[in-house]
Image: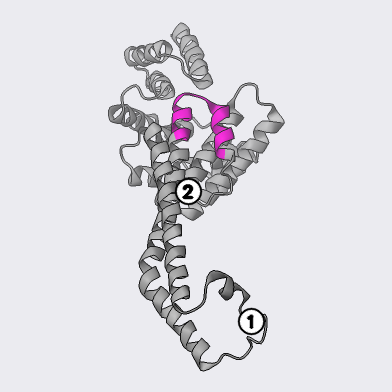
Amino acid sequence: MAASVSLVAAARRFHRGALWAVRRCLHGALRGAGLGWRQQASRGQGGGEVLGKSRFFRRGFALSAFSGLGYEAYMLFCQSSMILAKAQVDEVLDQADYLYGSGETEKLYQLLDQHKNSENAEILWRLARALRDLAQLSHTSAEKKKQLTYEALDYAKKALEKDPTIFAVHKWYAICISDVGDYEGIKTKIANAFVIKEHFQKAIELNPKDATSLHLMGIWCYTFAEMPWYQRKIAAVIFATPPSSTYEEALRYFQKAEDVEPNFYSKNMLFLGKTYMKLNNRKMALLWLTKAKERLVHTEEDMQVQKEAVELLNSI
């Protein structure tokens, strides 16, 4: 964090130095042509509508001099502006990732909300994630949860428009679409299933080593493997070939996520246990449910996972 702050400070100093260099070059060029800053600013206020040949020459000389002397400083100024902007964005992203890793959901939202008008996709998808995480907190009211869920989708959609080459943008866009489906009925939820799957697959394509995207693809498969009969009937009416999957397919994604990043997520352990239960593999179900129960708790979600793991273990 200290290194990031130092980088921003250095960029600011560089930016100010470049601005001073541009002004100095321009000022020198204008003085060489007989036009100081004050004279140039007041030009045209008294009888300046018609330029004589000498004034025209001086003006041309000033522009020529600026082109020769100031161009390099001007480019330096532009580059320093870009360096400063990037350093500021990098600092925000570093702080956001630290807060997310620490489970500081509300502080994370407060940080990113200051940058909600940003055009940077990396900031926007993180804001969508923060809003979604706020919605999931146990003390969030039902009305507030709905508002946050739709707001999260808005920012995820904006991030996708800004930069569709970022794997996390596709991942969180799909998550937010799925969450909104809970408020729009089973038909909409099923209709969105193909879009959700498409974006999870795109996230995996862009980053095959992202364990969370693999886990989410596993959740998609698990969800449609256990779809109730009445939902299957609705799906069959909407689509000639409705979305479907198997527990075996879900298991492959959950296991691959674990292979990529062992013990990365309590919920992946829980779903490995639940999937093995569905496949009647009691030994492996006990193994993964025990791991989910014994994993250190960092977030509210971890607490919920631990509670469900204990209940399932007691039922076996």
* Residue 78 drawn at (x, y percent): 42, 60
For residue 44, the mark is 1
Marks 2 and 1: which is nearer the front? Answer: 1
In this view, the residue in front, 58 or 196, is 58
Q: Nearer the viewer, residue 243 or 164?
A: 164
Kindly identify the amino acid type of the residue bearing the numbered disc 2: Ala
Residue at x 45% of width, y 58% of height = 20
Task: Give the residue displayed 47% in from the left and 69% down from the top.
Answer: 27
Q: Which residue is mark 2?
A: 121
Residue ID at (40%, 76%): 65
Task: Specify which label sits upstream in the sequence, 2 or 1.
Answer: 1
Residue 145 lies, in percent from the top left, at 65, 32
Which residues make up the magenta segment? 95-112
Residue type at the position of mark 1: Gly
In the displayed structure image, the side of residue 90 where residue 111 appears, left or right:
right
From the viewer's side, name the closer residue of 239 and 132.
132
Q: Residues within 10 Å of mark 1 (few under 14, many from 20)?
A: few
Q: Circle 1 — which element?
A: loop
Left or right: 158 in relation to 94: right
